Amino acid sequence: MAVLPSLEASPIWHPYTAVPATGPRALITKGHGAYLYDAEGKAYFDATSSWWCNLHGHSHPALVEALEKQARVLDQILLAPHAHPVVLEFCQALLDQMGAPFSKVFLSDDGSTAVEAGLKMALQYWHRQGQPQRREFLSLELGYHGDTLGAISVGHIDEFHKVFSALLSTRKSTAPYCYRCPLGKTYPACGVACLSEAERHLEEAGDRIAALVVEPLVLGAGGLVTYPAEYLDRLMDLCRQKGVLVIFDEVFTGFGRTGTFFAYEQLRNRPDIVCLSKGLTSGMLPMGATVATQAIFEAFCGGEKVKFFHGHTFTGNGLSAAVALASLRLLQSERVLERNQELSQFMAGQAERFRALPLVGDVRHLGMIWTLELVRDKATRALFEPANSAGWRIAKRAWEKGVWLRPMGQALYVIPPYCSSLEDLQRCFDVLYAEVEGEG
Ligand SMILES: Cc1ncc(COP(=O)(O)O)c(C=O)c1O
C-alpha cells in the first residue's frame, strides 16, 4: 500500500500548503458520493466539495460512463477551427441553459484561464472599437479570480496577491463586506454607500476602464462574503453609464451554488462576459468556459488580423466536453436545483444556534454556501492571529470525526456536494457546532 510521505520528502509541491503542514493530511484512495476515503478506509464527508467543484458526488456513474464512452471514440483534437460533435452539443446546451444575451462559448482549462480569456476579450474588444485607451480594470477588494498573472492583477486579497501586485495595476473598489462595513453602516439603511469608491473610479477614468470584473453575490476566497444583489445591480448601472463592460466571474457561483443556475439570474442586469469552471464538469476533469454576448463576438469577426488571439492546447477537449455535457444534463433532468432547496433551507436553519456561540461573529448563507466567521472577541470583532488559526484547530478536530473542512482566512464554511443527504448535513453541522463550541 502506498504511504503518505512528509511534505519535505514528497515529490509533490502542494498548492496553498504551509510546510510543515498546518492542517491534517491523508492519502485519499477513493471517492464515492459525498464522501472521500483514506487508505485505511476511513470516510470523510466532503464539506468543501473538493475545492467547491463537486456537484453530483465523486465518481458519479453517469459521468464515469460519459467519460469512458468518449475516451473510446475521440479524446482530443485541435479546435482551431475544427469541432467534434460532443463539444458542439455541449456549447449549445450551455447557451440554451444560460439564455439571452449569451451567444458564444470559448473553452479553456480551468477558472484562471476562463478569467484570462475574459480579460483579453475585453481588451481586444476595445481595440476593435477604436478605444485602445480602455486598458484598466475595475475590481473589488477581497476579490479573487485565480492565480495566473492576469487573474491576480484583478484580485485583491493581500495575503495571496501582495508579493505579485506590482506586476499589473487595477482600480480597486471597496468590498461590500456588511459585517465589517468600512463605513460603519448597516444594510439596507446604508443605501449601499460603499459604492462611492467605484463611482469615483468611474467618474475619474470611466473612458479608460475596459471592464468591471466581479464575483457576483459572494466574494469566495476573500472569506465567502455574501453581499446584496442591489450593490451589484447599481454598480452595473454605473458601468453601463460609462460604457464599461462587465465580466462576471462565476467560476465558483455557477451551476447552482447560489441557489439559481447562475448568480446573474438574481440580478436585473446581465453581464457581457461570464467565466465558468469548477462545477462545469462537477470536478471530474479540468475545464473552463468564457461565455460572451453576440456583440462581443462580432468585434472579432473580419479576418486574420482581428481574430481572438487566444487559445489553449486543450480547448474543447473531448473528454472534458463529454463530462461537462453529462453533468449539465444531470442538473437539468434530475431537477437538482429544486432538490437543493431542502438542503439549503436546512443550512439556513443552522444560523441561529451558531450565532449564539461566543466565537462566531457572523453567519452567512446563500443557496448551497454556508459560512461562519470566527472572531476572538465578539464585541470588537477582533480576529485570531493568524486569522485562520482557530479555524485550523477546529478543522483538525472535525477531521478526526470524519468531516473534511478547510478554513478560508477567518471563515469556516460548509459547501457540500448537491448529492448530500439531510443526514449527512445534520452530522456535519453537529460536528462543526461541537468543535466551535469546544474552541471557546
Ligand atoms: C471566483 C473564482 N475565480 C477563479 C478561480 C480560479 O480557478 P482555478 O483555481 O480553477 O484556476 C477561483 C478558484 O477558486 C474562484 O473561486
Image (cartoon, rainbow, N blue to C red):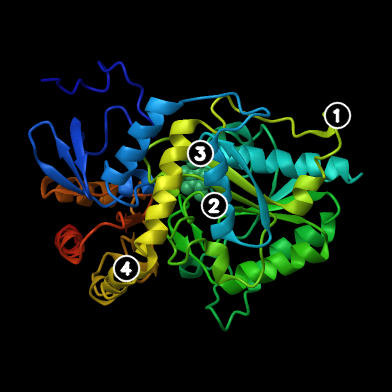
Q: CA distance from mark 2 to mark 3?
A: 12 Å
Q: CA distance from mark 3 to mark 4?
A: 28 Å
Q: Which residue is mark 2?
A: 94
Q: CA distance from mark 1 to mark 4?
A: 48 Å
The residue lying toward the viewer, choosing from 88 and 285, is 88
Q: Which mark is residue 305?
A: 1
**Which is more N-terminal, label 4 or label 1?**
1
**Which is more N-terminal, label 1 or label 2?**
2
- Tell me which amino acid carries mark 4: Arg
> In the drawing, does residue 95 fall left or right of residue 64?
right
The quarter holding residue 412 reads bottom left
- At x 68%, y 29%, the residue is 81
**Callout 3: 10 Å neighbours few (<14), some, many (20+)?**
many
Q: Which residue is mark 4?
A: 339
- At x 45%, y 36%, the residue is 320
Q: Which residue is mark 3?
A: 86
**Which is more N-terminal, label 4 or label 3?**
3
Q: Quadrant of the C terminus?
A: bottom left
Q: CA distance from mark 4 to mark 2?
A: 21 Å
Q: Secondary structure at mark 1?
A: helix
**Which is more N-terminal, label 3 or label 2?**
3
- Tell me which amino acid carries mark 1: Lys
- At x 82%, y 44%, the residue is 299
Ligand 1 contact, mark 2 (Cβ < 8 Å):
no
**Which is more N-terminal, label 1 or label 3?**
3
